[in-house]
Image (tube, rainbow, N blue to C red):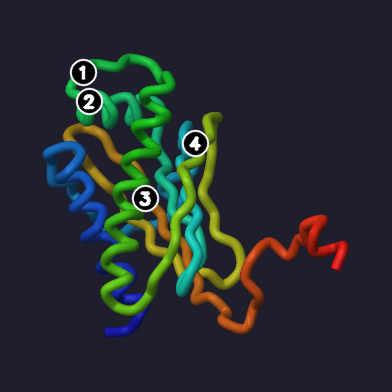
Amino acid sequence: MELAEQITENFAEASKEAFAALLSATPGITNTSQAQFAGAELICAITFSGALEGTAAIAISKAGACKLVSKMRMTDIAAVNSDVLGGTGEVLNMILGCVKARLQEIGRAMEISVPTVIQGNDLKVEGLGQAGTVTLEAAVDDFKFGIVFMYKISDPSRPKGTGLKTSAEDAS
């Protein structure tokens, strides 16, 4: 199986696994077009690096995010608040944690960042450059949202780190 197929399969299975753990639900997961998620009102993103580098994101409406976190917390949340923002981040964090474990099994170790949530109107998730992209649509109960995994294979010859020197390094 090619790497792109392994990533697609692992991302879809990891998404199902995370939803089962967090929501006690098995979502409908389908491969889809990234364009369907233009216009989202919340985007939660997590970057990753290691053997693969890139970004994973959830693109969802505010109403969908409220329903998602309401289901997760077993309480009714009517408007976006810090619980909704944090809960959306936790969903993506669980998905990416499952992806990380699955990819590590096939020799593709990676580290993940903390989630970042952006609110707005008519938001889009777009990949740049020549990144591979896996775009899924998740359906849980009566709401749908997009989950996107954009990646490229890391260049092992590229130096690690930020490229910035500390003052101690400048003194030497």
Cα separation between marks 2 and 3: 20 Å
Determine the secondary structure under disc 4: strand
Residue type at tag 4: Val
Determine the secondary structure under disc 1: loop
Which residue was labeled with disc 4? 117
Cα separation between marks 2 and 4: 19 Å
* Crowding near the residue tagged with mark 4, few <14, some 14–19, many ≥20 C-alpha atoms within 10 Å: some
Residue type at tag 2: Arg
Q: Are marks 1 and 2 in contact (CB under 8 Å)?
A: yes
Residue type at tag 1: Thr
Q: Is residue 153 left or right of residue 129?
A: left
**Mark 2 or 3, which is nearer the eye?**
2
Which residue was labeled with disc 3? 147
Which residue was labeled with disc 1? 75
Between discs 2 and 4, the one toward the N terminus = 2
Cα separation between marks 1 and 3: 24 Å
Cα separation between marks 3 and 4: 14 Å
Q: Which mark is residue 73?
A: 2
Choose top left, top right, bottom left or bottom right for residue 166: bottom right
Give the image location of residue 58, x and y in percent.
40, 45
Q: How many numbered marks does the figure carry?
A: 4
Residue drawn at x 87%, y 63% as measured from the top left: 171
**Mark 3 or 4, which is nearer the eye?**
4
Determine the secondary structure under disc 2: helix
Which quarter of the rendered picture does the N terminus lie within?
bottom left
Does 9 appear above or below 21?
below
Residue drawn at x 54%, y 54% as measured from the top left: 126
Give the image location of residue 138, x and y in percent.
27, 47
